[in-house]
Image (cartoon, rainbow, N blue to C red):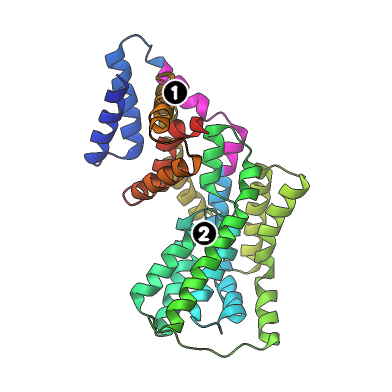
Amino acid sequence: MITLLFVAFLLLIALEVPIAFALGLASLGYLLLEGQTPLVILVQRMTSGLDSFPFLALPLFVLAGHIFNRGGIARRIFNFARALVGHFRGSLAHVNVVGSMIFAGMSGTAQADAAGLGVIEIEEMKKDGFDPAFAAAVSATSAIIGPIIPPSVIMVIFAVMTEVSVADLFLGGFIPGILMSLSLMAMIYWMAATGRIHAPVHPRQPFQVVWQTFLSAFPALVAPILLVGGMLLGVATPTELGAIVVVYGIVLGFIYRELTVPKLFRIFGEVGVTYAVLVFIISNAFPFGWLVAINQVPALLAEAILSVTANKWLVLLLINVALLIAGCFMETTAILVISVPVLFPLA
C-alpha cells in the first residue's frame, strides 16, 4: 500500500500538480484505498502539525526580508560591500557575494535576496561591463547563502517538522554560510585571474569612504547582531527576535523615508500570500509524513542502505547526491517536506 502513496505522489508531480495538492491528494487516496483509518485523521494531522510556537517565526522572518528589501537597506549594504571589497580581482562579483552574505542575516530566504539585492547587483555588474549571464549566475548562487546564514525560513520549517531547536539550527548555519561565501569568492578570483571572465579592476577605496558607507549601512547591520546576540545570550526566542527585527526594520524604513503606510500594507499583503502558500505545503506534508512513519518506511530504507554499505560517510554522500539531483527539478520547501519524514529517522 505504501508504494501506492509514493506512486500517486510522483504521478501527480509529473502531471504538474502543485506540491501541496500532490501531497494532500496522495495521502487522501491512500486512506480511501486503505479503508480502515477515519478520514478525519487527515485534517487532524494537518492542523496539529502547525500547532507549534517556533512556527510563528516563519511569517516574521519572511516579513523582515520584504521590509529590508523595500526599506532602502539593500542599496546601503551594496554600497558598503563595494567600498570594502570592490578593489579585489573580480570586483563587483565579490561585492555581490559579500553583499548577499550580509543581507542573509536579515532576509531568511534566497528569493528575498535575489529579488532585492540581486536586482541591484546585476544592474551594477552590467554597467561595469560584466557578461549579463555571469552576473545573473553569481547573483543566483550568492542568493543561496540567504537560507544558510540565519535567520532561515527553511531552518524554521525543518525545526517544526522535527521538533529540534530553532536557535541551535540558526547557530549552526554561520560557518557553512561563511565557507560557501569564501568558496564563491575563491572561484571568482580564479576566474578573473585566469581571464575566464571580464572583470574591471577598481582602485582601493580610501578608509574615509569605507567608513562613510559603513556608517550608512550600520543601522541595517544591527539586525543580524540583534538576532545572533539575542540567541547567544538567551534573552529571547527566535520567534521573539523575529518580531523585534520586524519592528526595527519598519522603524528604519520610515527613518530612511523609503517606507510609507500604503507601501507597508502592500508588503503585508504580499507576505500574507507567500506565507499562505508555505503553510499549505507544510500542513499537507504532515499527514504524508505520518503515513510514511506508520508504514515504517525509514526502517525499510535503513535496512536497504545497510545492505549496500555500513559506511556512514558513504551514506551521507549518497543522500547528498540524491538531494542535489532532486534540487535540479524541485523547490527547496517541497524537497524538505518530502525528504524529512523519510531521512530524519535514519539519524
Q: Is residue 306 above or below residue 176?
A: above
Which region shows up in magenta? Answer: 41-57
Apparent side of residue 6 relative to residue 171 in the rendered image (left or right): left
Residue at screen point 67% across, 89% down: 206
Q: Is residue 260 visible?
A: no
- Give 32 or 165, whichever is nearer the viewer: 165
Residue 303 spot, x, y in % from top left: 41, 27
Apparent side of residue 238 relative to residue 161 in the rendered image (left or right): right
Residue at screen point 37% across, 44% down: 322
Q: Which residue is mark 1?
A: 293
Work out which quarter of the rendered image holds the N terminus and state it.
Answer: top left
Q: Quadrant of residue 136?
A: bottom left
The amino acid on which the numbered mark 2 sits, given as a three-letter code, is: Ile
Residue at mark 1 to residue at mark 2: CA–CA distance: 32 Å
Type of secondary structure dominating the magenta stretch: helix
Question: Residue lying farthest bottom?
Answer: 203
Question: Residue lying farthest left?
Answer: 15
Q: Which residue is mark 2?
A: 145
Q: Is residue 254 visible?
A: yes
